[in-house]
């Protein structure tokens, strides 16, 4: 039987203030051995984590922060840091912003490619898996990124590929689904693991679990959703992952009986440990939710989606259409050219980063 690797959710992390509340070595029974950390936060400080040996540590390059926050980072500094601390290193990219014009987009794609090959050529620690990062919001742009990679070297030498810069489109599952399909279609012949930056949360587990039938190598996607919500005392509800604001009105002695929360009292949640407990509760439920998705039959998935994620029904339709008719017809039907911001200036959801 053909082995189908499954989608893995990657928690993008902030440092838990109290070690008791991490998900890799804390006092809880819940263990999850994935994390994404960003070179931007830890490059020049003492490394604050004490990870177990089997932890999968994805090292984001900090390219976005370097570009937008004026940090003085470079390819080799980031590479050496990734070699020291990470399992997988994302190459040092220059993300495309929605406001960038066509020329700037092309220049950034060029620099992203040069940086990726520079990392590959200078890698000293071969235990570090290097993923080449792609940027592009539509077929033409992603094809351009692929062409530059092909011109400048051999993509086969990378251990995987990642796509970044799609977070600003995350409120629109239709667009993320189309971009994901284009990306997969363009690079599927390389048969490498894929990572999607910033879109692992909420209903996106549904998309990636369906895409695994098209791309049979491993797919991962990260998000910081679980932690951001926890910090503001927002709990994700088990089945739906809907946000519930936690306050004294809706707290009672049976406030949550999940594997995390049953270890804590109402007082714990009301005191300063509250956010840490809720962050773990949220991660636990996202991971569990994605595990459940792996076992849901496609017909039932449709019903499930209808109830909990109606916004994502369009993604199911697009992926089914792609499976039947291929990429070209899918892009014609769902009009991917709309993703080019110069053609879509009025869309508010496209207007921020
Ligand atoms: Zn709970």
Image: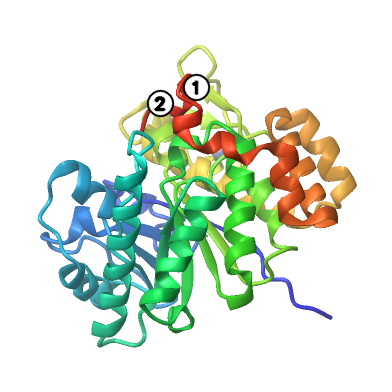
Residue position marked by numbered label 1 in the rendering: 347
173 up-or-down from 140: above or below: above
Q: Which residue extends farthest right?
A: 299
In-front residue for pair 307/33: 307
- Residue 29: tell me if it is visible: no
Q: Quadrant of the C terminus?
A: top left
Work out whether residue 321 or residue 271 is closer to the camera in this orientation and state it: 321
**The label number, if any, that marks residue 266 in the structure image:** none
Residue at coordinates 11% horizontally, 60% vertically from top-left? 44
Q: At x 34% / y 28%, what residue is drawn?
A: 271
| Percent of width and height locating residue 96 | 35, 46
- Please say if the residues under marks 2 and 1 sit with CB atoms less than 8 Å apart: yes
Q: Ligand 1 shows up in which quadrant of the image?
A: top right
Q: Based on the displayed image, in which of its 4 quarters is residue 227 positioned?
A: top left
Q: Position of residue 133 (x, y in %)?
A: 40, 63
Q: Secondary structure at mark 2?
A: loop
Q: CA distance from mark 2 to mark 1?
A: 7 Å
Q: Residues within 10 Å of mark 1 (few under 14, many from 20)?
A: few
- Give the image location of residue 269, x and y in percent: 42, 31
Q: Quadrant of residue 274?
A: top left
106 displayed left or right of 203: left
Q: Who is closer to the viewer here, 14 or 24?
A: 14
Alpha-carbon neighbours of circle 2 within 10 Å: few (<14), some, or many (≥20)? some
Judging by the rendered image, the residue that carries numbered circle 2 is: 351
Some atom of ligand 1 lies within 8 Å of the CB belonging to the residue at label 2: no
Determine the secondary structure under disc 1.
Answer: loop
Tell me if the residue at label 1 has its CB under 8 Å from ligand 1: no
Q: Quadrant of the N terminus?
A: bottom right
Which residue corresponds to the image point at 21% horizontal and 71% vertical from the top-left?
Answer: 81
Tell me: residue 84, above or below residue 327: below
């Amino acid at each position: 039987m053909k082995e189908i690797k499954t989608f893995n959710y990657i928690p993008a992390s902030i440092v838990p203030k109290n070690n008791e509340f991490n998900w890799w070595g804390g006092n809880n029974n819940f263990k999850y051995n994935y994390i994404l950390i960003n070179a931007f936060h830890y490059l020049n400080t003492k490394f604050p984590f004490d990870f177990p040996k089997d932890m999968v540590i994805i090292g984001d390059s900090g390219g976005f922060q370097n570009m937008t926050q004026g940090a003085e980072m470079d390819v080799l500094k980031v590479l050496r840091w990734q070699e020291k601390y990470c399992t997988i290193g994302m190459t040092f990219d220059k993300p495309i912003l929605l406001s960038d014009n066509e020329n700037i987009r092309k220049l950034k794609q060029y620099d992203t490619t040069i940086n990726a090959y520079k990392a590959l050529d200078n890698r000293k620690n071969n235990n570090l898996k290097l993923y080449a990062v792609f940027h592009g919001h539509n077929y033409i742009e992603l094809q351009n990124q692929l062409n530059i990679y092909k011109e400048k070297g051999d993509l086969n030498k990378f251990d995987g590929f990642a796509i970044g810069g799609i977070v600003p489109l995350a409120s629109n599952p239709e667009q993320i689904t189309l971009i994901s399909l284009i990306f997969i279609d363009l690079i599927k012949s390389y048969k490498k693991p894929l990572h999607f930056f910033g879109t692992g949360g909420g209903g996106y587990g549904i998309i990636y679990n369906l895409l695994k039938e098209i791309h049979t190598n491993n797919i991962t996607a990260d998000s910081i959703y679980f932690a951001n919500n926890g910090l503001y005392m927002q709990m994700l509800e088990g089945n739906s992952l809907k946000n519930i604001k936690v306050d004294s009105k809706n707290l009672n002695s049976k406030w949550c009986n999940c594997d995390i929360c049953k270890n804590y009292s109402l007082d714990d949640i009301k005191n300063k440990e509250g956010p840490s407990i809720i962050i773990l509760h949220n991660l636990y439920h996202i991971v569990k939710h994605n595990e459940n998705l792996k076992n849901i039959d496609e017909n039932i998935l449709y019903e499930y989606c209808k109830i909990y994620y109606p916004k994502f029904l369009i993604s199911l339709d697009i992926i089914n259409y792609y499976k039947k008719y291929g990429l070209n017809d899918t892009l014609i039907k769902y009009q991917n050219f709309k993703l080019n911001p110069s053609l879509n200036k009025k869309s508010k959801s496209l207007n921020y980063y």
